[in-house]
Amino acid sequence: QVQLVESGGGLVQAGDSLRLSCAASGRTFSNYYMGWFRQAPGKEREFVAAISRSGLATYYADSVKGRFTISRDNAKNTVYLLMNSLKPEDTAVYYCAATQRASPFYSGTYYNEPTYDYWGQGTQVTVSS
């Protein structure tokens, strides 16, 4: 069992930056692939970014590529999402997720929600125009 707690959300203006954190506890953090998802009002939850266990491989949705950066610190059991050049359409609840499944990252299906077994409670990000 892994417990995930997100933090760092808030209200910002378009063009601003924000860094989300997700602290993990309960199991060996470095054994888990980590992901970030988001859900905007009235929309389905969508994949944002993911990172390999070592942190050497990262994966992004096209909508955030070049603006968002996922990283992790295995010594601190924490994964981060640095969000630059924020847009109003980035407004959503952001969730971090964890999985030990490696095959989706080799097959390219890491963006699917069922890949992930553990989820945080989410943190709200609101971007005003």
Image (cartoon, rainbow, N blue to C red):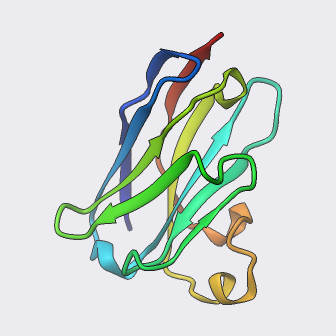
Q: Residue at x 42, y 32 (%)?
A: 18
Q: Residue furthest left?
A: 75
Which quarter shows the C terminus? top right
Q: Position of residue 104 (x, y in %)?
A: 68, 82
Image vertical order of residue 12 relative to residue 103, above or below: above
Q: Residue at x 48, y 23 (%)?
A: 16
In depth, the one of 83 and 109 nearer the eye is 83
Q: Residue at x 47, y 77 (%)?
A: 52
Image vertical order of residue 16 relative to residue 32, above or below: above
Q: Position of residue 46 (x, y in %)?
A: 73, 48
On screen, residue 115 versus residue 58, left or right, reads right
Q: Position of residue 27 (x, y in %)?
A: 29, 72
Q: Residue at x 73, y 27 (%)?
A: 89
Q: Position of residue 57 (x, y in %)?
A: 50, 78
On screen, residue 6 versus residue 83, left or right, reads left
Q: Residue furthest top?
A: 129
Count every numbered label the image shows and give the total.
0
Which quarter shows the N terminus? bottom left
Image vertical order of residue 126 relative to residue 51, above or below: above
In depth, the one of 83 and 95 nearer the eye is 83
On screen, residue 77 versus residue 100, left or right, reads left
